Image (cartoon, helix red, strand yellow):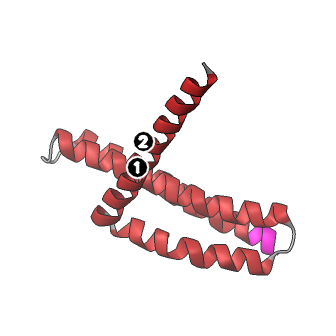
Amino acid sequence: MFRGIYQLARRRLVSALVYSIEGFGAAWNSEEAVKVEFALLPLFTVLALYLREDGLSRALLISVLILVVVVELLNTAIEKTIDRISTENNPLSKKVKDMGSAAVLGAIINAVVVWGFVLA
């Protein structure tokens, strides 16, 4: 019984990993902002590991960077969904896209503030 559950969970995990990698690829190919944030993530991760010795500070610095990438991926998904529904100019579509962009800006501001406090 447990072996069957283990195999099912393993298959599901592998499928989820494949879909996630495809999602990263789709975002990479369609959004310049994703490329910039993916390029900066390893650079700032190394910087966080170098600048701080305690694990909690390192984890905090890196997690806010990952949050920016996650919010950007969600924003990209929202934008692509809106474009899939209709490519014509629509005030509601613009508002939705602007809100997604505002969420990304909020995540970036959060990262800057956290880095500022941790490194001060």
Tell me: residue 50, above or below residue 101: below
79 vs 42, left or right, is left
Q: Which mark is residue 80?
A: none
10 vs 100, left or right, is right
Q: Give the amino acid at mark 2.
A: Ser
Circle 1 SS class:
helix
Circle 2 SS class:
helix
| Residue in the image at 41% along x and 65% along y | 34
Tell me: residue 23, above or below residue 81: below
Q: How crowded is the residue under tag 1: few (<14 C-alpha within 10 Å), some, or many (20+)?
A: few
Give x and y (percent) for residue 59. Answer: 75, 61
Q: Is residue 36 magenta?
A: no
Give x and y (percent) for residue 66. Answer: 59, 59
| Residue in the image at 34% along x and 45% along y | 78
Tell me: residue 113, above or below residue 47: above
| Residue in the image at 14% along x and 48% along y | 87
Q: Give the amino acid at mark 1.
A: Val
| Residue in the image at 53% along x and 32% along y | 7
Classify the position of the N terminus by image quarter: top right
Magenta region, main secondary structure: helix
- Which residue matches tag 1? 18
- Which residue matches tag 2? 15
Tell me: residue 7, above or below residue 81: above
Task: Find out whether the residues at labels 2 and 1 contact each other: C-beta distance under 8 Å.
Answer: yes
The region drawn magenta spans: 116-120
Give x and y (percent) for residue 21. Answer: 41, 55
Question: Residue 35 sits in which quadrant?
Answer: bottom left
In the image as oriented, which residue stretches furthest toward the right?
Answer: 54
Q: Is residue 99 visible?
A: no
Q: Is residue 118 magenta?
A: yes
